[in-house]
Amino acid sequence: MQNVLLIVAVGIAAVFVTGYSLKKLGRPFKTLPLTLHKLLGVGVFIYLAVTVVRLARAGSLNGLGWGLCLLAGALFLAALASGGWLAAAKGEARLAETLHRILPRLAVIATIAWFYLLIRR
């Protein structure tokens, strides 16, 4: 489980670093940094999904674990969607920017809570 935590932590940190880099570079977003940011985000999501499947098969998830897992997954998907909206928006997209600022942080908080619950067991 420690390896999973480390991989997820590094992945999330890389997503945030590339996101802040994109913000500093400004709009229009450069193709390479934007693609790297998107791939990292999707990669972390897929890695977490695979981890959930493995834990589910091992019977390691209880009701609260499933609830936090589903919440974190929904927040990750919403963060990915808001990022896609932000990247595709022509001109100013304040709502997309606000959502994309809040949703990834909420997804990370839900993921941390989920991992804490798993480790505590």
Image (cartoon, rainbow, N blue to C red):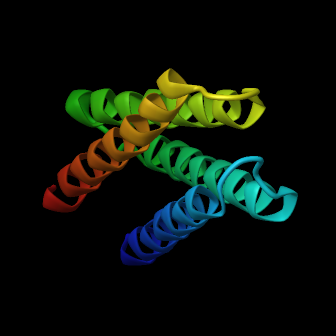
- Residue 14: where, in percent of width, then height? 55, 70
Q: Vertical placement of 80 versus 114: above or below? A: above
All told, the count of numbered labels is 0
- Residue 89: where, in percent of width, then height? 72, 27
Residue nearest the observer in this picture, 50 or 46: 46
Residue nearest the observer in this picture, 69 or 34: 34
Farthest-out residue, front: 91
Farthest-out residue, right: 31
Q: Residue at x 40, y 28 (%)?
A: 70
Name the image quarter holding the N terminus.
Answer: bottom left
- Residue 52: where, in percent of width, then height? 48, 45
Q: Residue at x 62, y 37 (%)?
A: 83
Q: Is residue 7 left or right of residue 38?
A: left
Q: Residue at x 84, y 64 (%)?
A: 32
Residue nearest the observer in this picture, 120 or 59: 120
Residue nearest the observer in this picture, 76 or 87: 87
Q: Dividing the picture into quarters, in which one does residue 110 lie?
A: top left
Farthest-out residue, left: 120
Q: Vertical placement of 72 versus 119: above or below? A: above
Name the image quarter holding the C terminus.
Answer: bottom left
Q: Residue at x 67, y 27 (%)?
A: 85
Q: Vertical placement of 58 versus 36: above or below? A: above
- Residue 103: where, in percent of width, then height? 41, 35
